[in-house]
Amino acid sequence: MTELTQNPAVGSAASDDSKAGHPMWSSRLAFILAASGSAVGLGNIWKFPYITGENGGGAFVLVYLLCIALIGIPIMVAEVAIGRRGGCSPINSMRKLASRDGLSKRWVWLGGMGMIASFLILSFYSVIGGWALAYVGNSAGGLFVGASSESIGAMFGGLLSDPYTLLMWHSLFMVLVIMIVARGVSSGMEKAINILMPLLFALILVMVGYAMSTDSFGAGFSFLFSPDFSKLTTEGVLTALGHAFFTLSLGMGVMMAYGSYLPKNVSIVKTAFTVSVVDTVVALLAGLAIFPLVFSNGMEPGAGPGLIFQTLPIAFGQMPGGVLFGTLFFVLLVVAAVTSAISLLEPVVEWFEEQKGINRLNGALIGGLSIWALGILTILSLNEWSGFHPLGMFERFEGKTIFDLLDYVTANLMMPLGGLFIALFMGWFMSKQAAENELSIGNGAAFKLFMFILRFVTPAAVLVVFVYNLM
Ligand code: TRP
């Protein structure tokens, strides 16, 4: 097998140990930071609150938490373990493991599907990242100061209705991501991230503190945490499942790629657990910061993808130091989005390198520019083409724009499907000995429970949710 080039998204954190030529993470913490950088992103701060609002709150949150615990964490463990055992990029890891265990070559498709999903996700992820960039400017320019919820809503509506402005910010976001992936993540940048991510966490806490000072904190809290199952639909359950995959960056080989850099003596179970908890806490805190504002300003929790852009600025406009806090918040949101976006472009670039022998710079440019071009469809979905529903003849897709469809197909179909096959691969196909070695939790009750979850619970849960939704 040809030697793989070092994965720069993780390479700098990796010390060149490698007898085999494959670099390794310098520590467990380095892995946790990189994996959390991929996991914590727009999914936590933008998507989680708005889909929670659209799906009625508490009951949805409960299902989401169950999906994280019963499906997300086991699949993350499996994905990292497969990656560590394979030791290559996802496609080649699958190829290697399948041939080693005498399995079908078709397992390689798992890596292929992940790459396509990355491509599709980044095309709309970048447009939303562009919104965050635009809001850095809005905040720094003092546009939120004393603004009413109506004028904040109008500001957001104005942004969405203007394709050229959206295109400008989407382009800027993609340029940032392409530049970083083309050069490889420098250690300087990584150090910066290690400071900026905790800062983002601190700022979300400030926002939760502000939310506590409003008279609607109780209302927001109970919206999030008291389940009302009459508000939960089967599509809501599928959305919760899909989001568990989306927010943990699962089912597409990203964690597999990261796992291939994990030293053998690090506990995968503990590490996956830590990353999942960090990710979940950030999402819940974002919800706690946002819903009290929704209620205290008489807004609709189901306002859709604009939710955080229509609520948080109201708070920034009223609180002392709001210009500073607001600007900082959106800068950090951009940083979180960029670190996730890097992990989405990386597999595409790696594939170009391995299959087509295209170098990193050109790979990042070709991949990035195609994704950028595809992003234009999302931009148009928000304005000129907002009435265009390409699959509107199917009841399920009624009223869905191209943007909605991209989101739906990747998060609700491709990722759970990828996750299902990852669980099946480790649960049923990989040798038990190998699974035991990778997990290193012995072969006692804990191991048996884990394998039971992987073999039965996870696949059944994914299938049940799928089947219900197809009916
Ligand atoms: N997890 C990221 C978020 O919540 C999005 C993301 C980055 C992702 N890389 C991924 C999702 C890989 C699925 C697969 O914003």
Image (spheres, grey):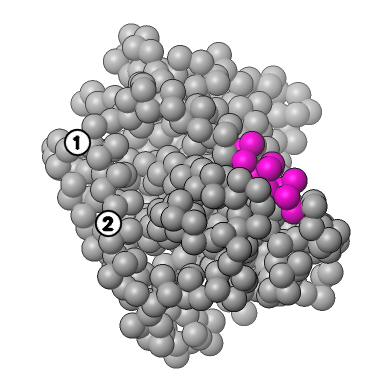
- Residue at left 49%, top 56%? 142
Callout 2: few (<14), some (14-19), or many (20+) C-alpha neighbours within 10 Å? many
The answer to whether one can see residue 419 in this image is no
Q: Name the secondary structure under disc 1.
A: helix
Left or right: 210 as drawn, with respect to 200 = right
The secondary structure making up most of the magenta span is: helix
Residue at image mark 2? 171
Residue 436 image position (x, y, % from top left): 61, 24
Q: Is residue 210 magenta?
A: yes
- The residue sitting at 40% across, 58% down in the picture is 134
Q: Bounds of the magenta span?
A: 201-211
Residue 391 showing in the rendered view:
yes
Q: Tell me which corner region of the image, top left, top right, bottom left or bottom right, holds residue 281.
A: top right
| Dot placed on the residue nearer the N-terminal end, 1 or 2 | 2
Which residue is identified by label 1?
360
Residue at 65 percent across and 57 percent down: it is 318
Say which quadrant the N terminus sits in.
Answer: top left
**In the rendered structure, which amino acid carries the disc numbered 2?**
Ser
